[in-house]
Image (cartoon, coloured by chain):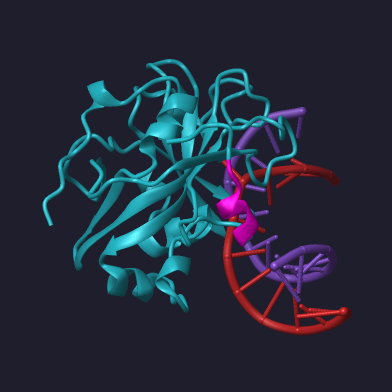
Chain colours: A cyan, B purple, C red
DNA sequence: AGCCAGATTTTCT
DNA sequence: GAAAATCTGGCTA
């Protein structure tokens, strides 16, 4: 399968636009044993001035990658067990990002299964923790340039047309919970949360 | 299908 | 010291 890498100059800013735009695009994980890839079907934007964002209180050792130019990886560890992958979404020096919440596997399902057994393909990378585990993403990936078109992790163009995009409130946060900054492909079984949430229609259509 | 508790460690208050 | 951008398994219906 031929994949075209996304260029930094085509990534929309700010974060809310990028989060919506990334739906349907491809995440590529080049592993020594082979390639894994998947369609991005669910994202969340963590925007400037957002009290629920990790960059809210300024730059620290942990969140530094959020302040890189758009298109860099920010990987952090949560709940004592999981990694989560974000794409930096603000211009250099601006701390904001897009959390990649779920993938629909395209290539390398067997390789993912070696990292994380799942009963169905749709469950393999359904949720941010599962996504990172399935792809073998750890802290070492923090700060990677995802627009390089090579290396262990990069972003590529869509492999086929995407469906309609739903919008809703973000998951798992306790501040700014009302903001409609979660984006997903409506009806896709790889979208996390209860099925009602994957079908919920947002304010925006595709 | 939905609710709940437990796991487990980093980070900042 | 508390909370955290989560997941799983076990329970109730």
Q: Residue at x 13, y 57 (%)?
A: A1
Residue A90 in magenta stretch: no
Residue in the image at 25% along x and 44% along y: A158
Tell me if residue A129 comes above or below residue A177 in the rendering: below
- The image position of residue C7, as x and y in percent, is 58, 65
Can residue A128 be seen at all in this image of the molecule? yes
A129 sits left or right of A116 in the view: right
Q: Nearer the viewer, residue A68 or A131?
A: A131
Q: Main secondary structure of the magenta part?
A: helix
Q: Position of residue B9 (x, y in %)?
A: 60, 55
Q: Residue at x 55, y 56 (%)?
A: A192
Front residue of A73/A7: it is A7
Horizontal and vertical percent position of residue A137: 38, 54
Q: Quadrant of residue A46?
A: top right
In the rendered view, tell whether residue A193 sits above or below residue A206. below
In the image, is A30 to the left or to the right of A15? left
Q: Let me know if residue A196 is in the magenta part.
A: yes
Vertical side of A145 occupied by A111: above or below: below
Could you tell me which quadrant the C terminus of chain A lies in? Answer: top left
Q: Residue at x 69, y 41 (%)?
A: A173
Residue A136 can be seen in this image: no
Q: Give the magenta part as a residue range.
A: A195-201
């Amino acid at each position: 399968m031929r994949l075209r890498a996304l260029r930094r100059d085509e990534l929309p800013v700010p974060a809310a636009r990028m989060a919506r735009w990334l739906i349907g695009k491809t995440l590529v994980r080049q592993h020594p044993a082979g390639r894994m890839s998947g369609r991005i079907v669910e994202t969340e934007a963590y925007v400037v001035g957002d009290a629920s964002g990790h960059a809210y209180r300024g730059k620290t050792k942990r969140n530094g990658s959020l302040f890189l130019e758009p298109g860099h990886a920010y990987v952090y560890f949560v709940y004592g067990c999981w990694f989560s992958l974000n794409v930096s979404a603000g211009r250099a020096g601006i701390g904001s990002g897009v959390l990649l919440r779920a993938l629909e596997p395209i290539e390398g399902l067997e390789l993912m299964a070696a990292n994380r057994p799942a009963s169905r393909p749709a469950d393999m990378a359904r949720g941010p923790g599962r996504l990172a585990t399935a792809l073998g993403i750890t802290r070492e990936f923090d700060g990677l340039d995802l627009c390089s078109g090579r290396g262990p992790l990069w972003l590529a163009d869509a492999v086929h047309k995407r469906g309609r995009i739903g919008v809703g409130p973000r998951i798992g946060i306790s501040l700014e919970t009302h903001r409609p900054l979660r984006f997903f492909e409506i009806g896709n079984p790889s979208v996390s949360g209860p099925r009602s949430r994957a079908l919920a229609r947002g304010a925006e259509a595709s």
